[in-house]
Amino acid sequence: MLTIERLTRRFGDFVAVDGIDLEIPTGQMVGVIGRSGAGKSTLLRMIDRLIEPTSGTIRFEGRDVTTLKGASLRHWRRDCAMVFQQFALVDRLDVLTNVMMGRLDHMSAWRSMAKLWTADDKAIALSALELFDIGNLAAKRAVDLSGGQQQRVAIARALVQEPRVILADEPIASLDPRNTKLVMDALLRVNRDFGITVLTNLHSIDLAKRYCDRLIGMRAGQVVFDGAPAQLTDAVVRDLYGLEAADVIEIPTVDDPTPDEIRAAWDDAHAREPV
């Protein structure tokens, strides 16, 4: 359980996140939605402690994350992996090495400084790449990949950290529709197959409804909606987005599956896969 209590972040006189209370059970896939500037990215970055809260607490399974320092904080960032909008890969390094960077906190200090990867580390990294159908890219430099490929590499790197939580900060913001689907499918697979809690900021209401178990709507730093995708009506969206609502409400075609049908089909397909 990830528990957030009265979490607040001020930048001078501006309140980016204003006294948020949330409880997120282990294994949920949660979409965080709202206008630009609503506080979505600040919330995720505070959970990972990339931004320090002004006040409030973050607890994971009873441990107070807001007080962690040094090695304890590094271990939390291993358990709570970040996936960024701009991928955060090392362009000049090959894909396999980029993924193995996620193993650094599982190595001894001298091995991590020298980047002396073990055979097990390489096998884990290759398995993660294969999981997302990019094992054939292991020897390519990151700079030579498409945006969608780079984001799947970033998710593979997060997965090999063996995290309990993955925070994805606008992971599809710069991607075309095909790569958007591939990246969202990758996050869903991490959630469904490994039971990892996923919190992701999304601009598309349609995608948020299709992929997430729960949606959290933010406005002016506060949570103003928290519920199942089916509860997010057009009226709630208009309240969240104001004049921008028309840009994020997508009208489905008659043949489009519902969010529940998509999640049921995913679970059914993977339940029938051979072990």
Image (cartoon, rainbow, N blue to C red):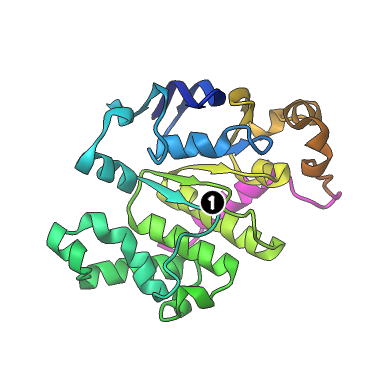
Res 108 visible:
no
Residue 138 placement, left or right of 208: left
Type of amino acid under label 1: Leu
**Residue nearer the viewer, 211 or 267:** 211
**Residue nearer the viewer, 191 or 53:** 53
Residue 24 lies, with reference to residue 248, above or below; the image says above
Res 87 visible:
yes
Count of all numbered marks drawn on residues in the image: 1
Q: Which residue is mark 1?
A: 188
- Regarding mark 1 in the picture, which secondary structure is present there? helix
Q: Residue furthest front?
A: 12
Residue 264 covered by magenta stretch? yes
Residue 230 covered by magenta stretch? no
| Image quarter in which the C terminus is found | bottom left
Within-10-Å neighbours for mark 1: few <14, some 14–19, many 20+: many
Residue at figure coordinates x 43%, y 49% from the top left: 82
Q: Which residues are magenta?
A: 253-275
Residue at figure coordinates x 71%, y 30% from the top left: 232
Residue 2 placement, left or right of 73: right
Give x and y (percent) for residue 138. 42, 77
